[in-house]
């Protein structure tokens, strides 16, 4: 349970940090030059979606690293269990 809570908090923190970094880059390089200032709502929407995508990407990399370093599968029941179907014949 603590792993899931920690992973969720990590994912939210990465999303917030990436949103602020993307916003700073947008404000410094793109605001008013490439993207007109009257389309700021579209820019914020795209920044929000991009920050979520970045957080998912970073989360998958960190999770893959943790699974390789620690054997976390022995602490969790599998989420999806394959049912074996025997052929009769």
Image (cartoon, rainbow, N blue to C red):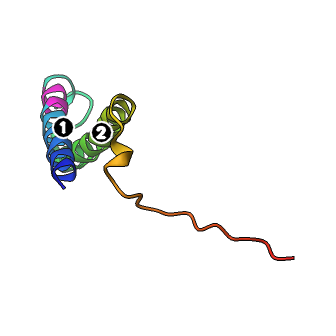
Q: Position of residue 67 (x, y in %)?
A: 37, 36
**From the viewer's perspective, is residue 20 above or below residue 53?**
above
Residue located beneath label 1 in the image = 14
- Considering depth in this image, is 62 or 12 the residue closer to the camera? 62
Residue located beneath label 2 in the image = 59
- Name the mark nearer the viewer: 1 or 2: 2
Residue at image x 37%, y 58%?
A: 77
Quadrant of residue 21 within the rendered picture = top left
- Considering depth in this image, is 69 or 9 the residue closer to the camera? 69
Q: Is residue 52 left or right of residue 17?
A: right
Q: Are marks 1 and 2 in contact (CB under 8 Å)?
A: yes
* Residue 37 within the magenta-colored segment of the rendering: no
Label 2: how many Cα within 10 Å (few below 14, some 14–19, many 20+): some
Q: Position of residue 16 (x, y in %)?
A: 13, 40
**Magenta stretch, residue numbers:** 21-27
- Considering depth in this image, is 79 or 12 the residue closer to the camera? 79
- The quarter of the rendered structure image containing the N terminus is bottom left
Residue at image x 12%, y 34%?
A: 20
Q: Position of residue 22 (x, y in %)?
A: 19, 32
């Amino acid at each position: 349970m603590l792993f899931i809570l920690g992973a969720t908090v990590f994912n939210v923190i990465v999303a917030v940090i990436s949103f602020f970094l993307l916003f700073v880059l947008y404000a410094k390089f793109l605001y008013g030059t490439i993207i007109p200032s009257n389309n700021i709502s579209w820019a914020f929407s795209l920044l929000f979606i991009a920050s979520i995508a970045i957080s998912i990407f970073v989360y998958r990399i960190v999770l893959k690293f943790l699974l390789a370093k620690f054997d976390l599968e022995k602490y969790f029941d599998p989420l999806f269990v394959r049912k074996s179907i025997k052929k009769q014949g």
